[in-house]
Image: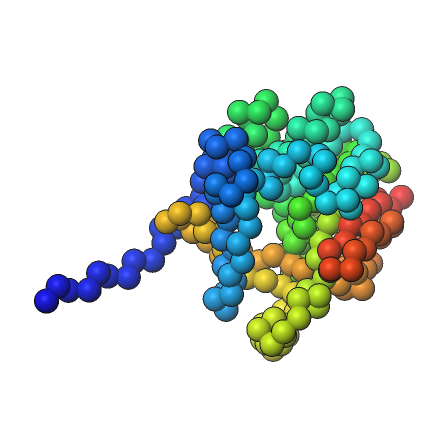
């Protein structure tokens, strides 16, 4: 009788970069490469990686509405494959992307998009030079958590020019109904975390990223996080499915 095959864990590595490289190699064709998002309670979601390369016409309406407000030099925090920067570059903006994934940086460079390795809390940029910061694709999640958000918002203000703005999208965690999500929210509260403070990792093939925190907040929770920061909550765009867009304006 044959011995059963061992159950092998995924290899830890740059799963996001691996995913984007695979999608780039098929030119972002839909249905070819899929991103698996694994939450710490075992819940998983699947997204078509072609979305990272989708043209402007296919972007959510709230992203297009926010990008119409873009001005001056632009920093994209968590730029991924760089689709927003590619569009803005063609519009004449000076742009820079920052991402923690070496593979994402390589994919940006293949498209002649300037990008650097860094994180939302440690931007590889000089002080006071960007007129617009982007955190689209629900990248308000990069605020991480209550304490992390304070550090992150200060860092975004450090690189912002006077009168700068953040154009960002997020997701209300309470729009996800059902006992699986409500139980996860309560477990977070019991641990002293925000309800929508997800602990997730990205899977691509046999690779898995390290787990990291990614924050979903209601608009009321976001307003509370921003209140004591260098930013003021401005224009908001809400859709009925829980997604939203916001403008944060740098305080005088």
The residue lying at 73 percent from left, 49 percent from top is 169
Left or right: residue 191 compared with residue 84: left
Is 202 in front, or is 189? 202
**Where is residue 228 shown, x and y percent of the image?**
81, 58
Residue 158 visible to an observer of this rendering: no
Question: Residue shown at 82%/35% (left/top)?
Answer: 68
Q: Is residue 38 visible?
A: yes
Left or right of 135 on screen, residue 250: right
Q: Point out the residue furthest to the right here.
A: 252
Front residue of 26 and 21: 26
Q: Is residue 239 left or right of residue 215?
A: right
Q: Eyeballing the image, is 176 above or below 114?
A: below
Query: As displayed, is residue 110 above or below residue 101?
Result: above
Q: Where 215 sits versus 87, above or below?
A: below
Residue at left 67%, top 50%?
138
The coloring applied to the image is: rainbow
Q: Quadrant of the C terminus?
A: top right
- Residue 101 percent location from the top left of the image: 51, 40
Outermost left residue: 1
Residue at 66 percent of width and 41 percent of height: 77
Residue furthest to the front = 31
Quarter of the image holding residue 28?
top right
Q: How many marks?
A: 0
Q: Position of residue 137 (x, y in %)?
A: 66, 46
Q: Quadrant of residue 2?
A: bottom left
Of residue 164 and residue 125, the one placed in the foreground of this image is 164
Position of residue 156 measured from the top left corner of the image (x, y, whole percent) = 72, 43
């Amino acid at each position: 009788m044959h011995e059963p095959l061992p159950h092998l864990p995924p290899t830890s590595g740059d799963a996001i970069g691996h995913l984007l490289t695979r999608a780039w190699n098929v030119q972002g064709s839909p249905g070819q490469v899929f991103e698996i998002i694994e939450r710490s309670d075992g819940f998983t979601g699947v997204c078509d990686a072609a979305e990272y390369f989708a043209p402007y016409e296919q972007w959510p309406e709230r992203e297009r509405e926010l990008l119409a407000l873009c001005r001056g030099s632009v920093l994209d925090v968590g730029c991924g494959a760089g689709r927003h920067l590619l569009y803005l570059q063609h519009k004449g903006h000076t742009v820079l992307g920052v991402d923690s994934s070496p593979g994402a940086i390589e994919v940006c460079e293949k498209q002649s998009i300037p990008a650097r390795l860094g994180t939302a809390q440690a931007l590889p940029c000089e002080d006071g030079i960007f007129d617009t910061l982007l955190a689209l694709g629900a990248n308000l999640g990069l605020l991480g958590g209550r304490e992390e958000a304070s550090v992150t918002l200060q860092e975004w203000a450090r690189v912002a020019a006077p009168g700068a703005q953040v154009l960002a999208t997020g997701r209300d965690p309470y729009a996800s109904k059902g006992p699986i999500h409500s139980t996860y929210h309560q477990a977070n509260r019991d641990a002293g975390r925000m309800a929508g403070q997800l602990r997730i990792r990205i899977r691509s093939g046999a690779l898995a990223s390290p787990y990291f925190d990614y924050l979903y907040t209601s608009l009321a929770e976001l307003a509370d996080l921003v209140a004591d920061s260098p930013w003021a909550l401005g224009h908001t765009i809400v859709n009925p499915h829980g997604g939203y867009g916001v403008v944060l304006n740098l305080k005088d």
